[in-house]
Amino acid sequence: MYETETEFARTLVAEACTLTRRVQEEIVANADSLTKGDRSPVTLADLTVQTVMGHRLAKRYPGDAFLAEEESSSLAASPSMAEKVGALVRSVAPELDGDSIAAALDRGGHPGGSEGRHWVLDPVDGTKGFLRGQQYAIALALVDGGNVVVGALGCPNLPAPGERGNGDGWIFHATDSAGAWATPVAGGDAAPAMVDSVNDSSRAIVCESVEAAHAAHSVQAGIARRLGITTEPYRIDSQCKYAVLARGEASIYLRLPRDESYREKVWDHAAGAIVIEEAGGRVSDLDGNPLDFSKGRRLATGRGIVATNGLLHERVLEACREELETQP
Ligand code: AMP
Ligand code: MG
């Protein structure tokens, strides 16, 4: 089931990898003229990807809803941005004009939930990494009856397996009960993606956010110590963390909140979660419950997210509980 949806999602993500790379190359080329804190390149990339995907999904699956991060109000607020988005969108979808761009974007306003089918999109996940010229992801998932059944995760700068830093990019895709796969952005055969088989926690590599505002690095360091880990964490932006776990380059992904009132957004985890599970790993909240994508545009849990190769999961949850007990 869902094979055609998976292939379609993979194609959309591949197109988005190419589009966002063009924008990111311009950032690098224009580094001098961009002021620090200028988010216009990521806004251009986000809005363009969401427009093109919203449009293509509506044509192919008109009965499916769409839940995505951006809104057309950001275009209405900036005519110069609207013009840039229009030009980039029309380079791949010449049939779209201003009104149909706004309509395609705003299809993404679905509230989520447990009824029927909806596609979930983070057009550019890891915007900080994108602006630094580093890692980011394009994350598309299909939720059916509240469960994630398809995920396509584009990691346009991910290097070859075993390497760090920027590379030529990989796309991961997963379908419920049919495994996870990785394909180079440049094309070629899909190879199975599988988590590692580390079951001695002291040998595990932990991956975590680069941004200290997105995860409690010091608490996570305490958890790693309890697990006997002495290797530095692998810091990488975006759902690329799920990707490196899914191909066995790290065994644990910790995302403990800095602020427990923050509720994680479904588009930040849906595609990554199915890729991990289909690669043989496990993802849960701190109580060990699977992430619940049926509650709306955000997850209900506020205590944190843990993903592992599966073998280490209970041990890691225990270390999280022990460490949190010592926190004020
Ligand atoms: P990462 O690249 O893994 O650090 O996470 C990027 C994602 O973090 C973005 O897509 C945001 O939606 C999300 N984010 C923003 N603020 C927070 C926060 N305070 N805590 C956790 N995640 C956040
Ligand atoms: Mg995001």
Image (spheres, rainbow, N blue to C red):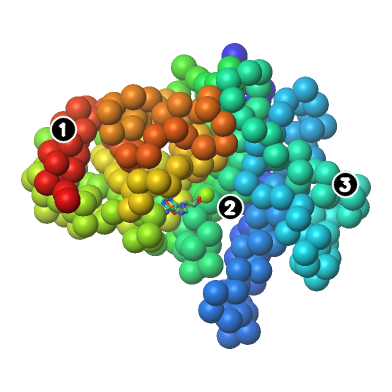
Residue holding disc 1? 318
Q: Which amino acid does label 1 sit on?
A: Glu
Question: Where does residue 46 sit, x and y in percent of width and height?
Answer: 65, 55
Find the distance from the CA under tag 1 to the CA under tag 2: 33 Å
Ligand 2 neighbours mark 2 (CB distance < 8 Å) = yes
Local packing at callout 1 (Cα closer than 10 Å; few below 14, some 14-19, many 20+) is: some
The part of the image, by quadrant, that contains residue 58 is: top right
Find the distance from the CA under tag 3 to the CA under tag 1: 51 Å
Mark sitting earlier along the chain (3/2): 3
The answer to whether one can see residue 99 in this image is yes
Q: How many marks?
A: 3
Find the distance from the CA under tag 3 to the CA under tag 2: 21 Å
Q: What residue type is labelled 3?
A: Ser
SS type, badge 3: helix
Figure check: 76 above or below 35: above
SS type, badge 2: strand
The answer to whether one can see residue 172 in this image is no
Quarter of the figure with the N terminus: top right
Residue holding disc 3? 100
In the orientation shown, which residue stands out farthest toward the top? 1
Question: Where does residue 320 sit, x and y in percent of width and height?
Answer: 19, 39
SS type, badge 1: helix
Left/right of residue 44 with respect to residue 75 in the rendered view: left
Mark sitting earlier along the chain (1/2): 2
Question: Where does residue 31 sit, x and y in percent of width and height?
Answer: 57, 80
Cβ atoms under marks 3 and 1 closer than 8 Å: no
Figure check: 98 above or below 195: below
Give the numbered dot on residue 124.
2
